[in-house]
Image (cartoon, rainbow, N blue to C red):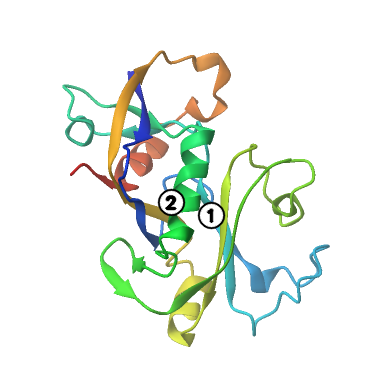
């Protein structure tokens, strides 16, 4: 399948909202931090905090998208570079979109508030490793505090398991696909179905 890098267009908004979903496109669930009371991070992680942390974008992670989504004749892969990931994370903050939240890409919510946003600079030293993640350099990590007890219960029950961006304003540039360099591309049929369903990117 063909592979496309998605690059942010000049003066375009990028990520305009964050959604929590049951099956995140990056295939990495966010941490339900109340489970990690014994974490070496010593972040006062407990039930009262009601905080969820996870990756918003993993750079160079190839996501299968439909032909319709890509505006091509067949399905293919898309990904964001480290540079684009950093641009998107910065614009999300500077343009104050961090608390634009949806549930499952459908329902707007005011029940989550951003508490942290950072880029992994050194995977061997980043706090994400202490929290149980093994993610590459350049990954955009976020933490949200849940403001609603009912939503927190839904998260604990597994109804929502990760983050998925909502974004607009991209050019796609075709790239050669090197299967040997991407362990993420060893996909089974179930994974392909999951990847096809998420990451709401819309061209204007």
Q: Are marks 1 and 2 in contact (CB under 8 Å)?
A: yes
The location of residue 52, given as percent across then percent down, is 57, 67
Which quarter shows the C terminus?
top left
Q: Which residue occupies the foreground of this view, 137 or 156?
A: 137
Which quarter shows the N terminus?
top left
For the point 48% across and 26% down, the residue is: 185
Q: Is residue 107 above or below residue 55?
A: below
The location of residue 102, given as percent across then percent down, is 34, 67
Whole-angstrom CA distance, mark 1 to mark 2, is 7 Å
Please indicate, yes or no, whether residue 168 appears anywhere in the rendered image.
yes
> Is residue 128 shown left or right of residue 159?
right
Could you say which disc has been placed on residue 163 in the image? none
The location of residue 136, given as percent across then percent down, is 64, 37
Residue denoted by label 2: 24
Residue denoted by label 1: 29
For the point 30% across and 28% down, the residue is: 172
Q: Is residue 79 above or below residue 147?
A: above
The location of residue 25, given as percent across then percent down, is 41, 46
For the point 44% across and 34% down, the residue is: 80
> Is residue 97 shown left or right of residue 69?
right
For the point 51% across and 35% down, the residue is: 83
Classify 10 Å Cα crowding around label 2: few (below 14), some (14-19), many (20 and above): many
């Amino acid at each position: 399948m063909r592979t496309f890098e998605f690059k942010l267009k000049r003066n375009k908004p990028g990520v305009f909202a964050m959604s929590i979903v049951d099956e995140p496109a990056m295939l990495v669930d966010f941490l339900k931090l109340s489970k990690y009371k014994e974490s070496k991070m010593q972040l006062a992680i407990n039930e009262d905090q009601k905080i969820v942390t996870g990756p918003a974008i993993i750079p160079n992670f190839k996501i299968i998208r439909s032909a319709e989504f890509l505006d091509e004749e067949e399905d293919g892969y898309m990904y964001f570079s480290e540079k684009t990931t950093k641009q998107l994370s910065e614009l999300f903050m500077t343009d104050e979109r961090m608390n634009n939240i949806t549930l499952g890409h459908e329902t707007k919510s005011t029940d989550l508030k951003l508490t942290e946003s950072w880029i992994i600079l050194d995977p061997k030293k980043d706090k994400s490793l202490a929290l149980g993640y093994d993610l590459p350099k350049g990954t955009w990590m976020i933490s949200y505090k849940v403001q609603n007890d009912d939503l927190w219960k839904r998260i604990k029950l597994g109804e929502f398991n990760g983050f998925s961006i909502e974004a607009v304003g991209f050019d796609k540039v075709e790239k050669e696909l090197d299967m040997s360099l991407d362990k993420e591309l060893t996909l089974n049929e179930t994974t392909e179905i999951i990847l096809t369903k998420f990451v709401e990117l819309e061209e204007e």
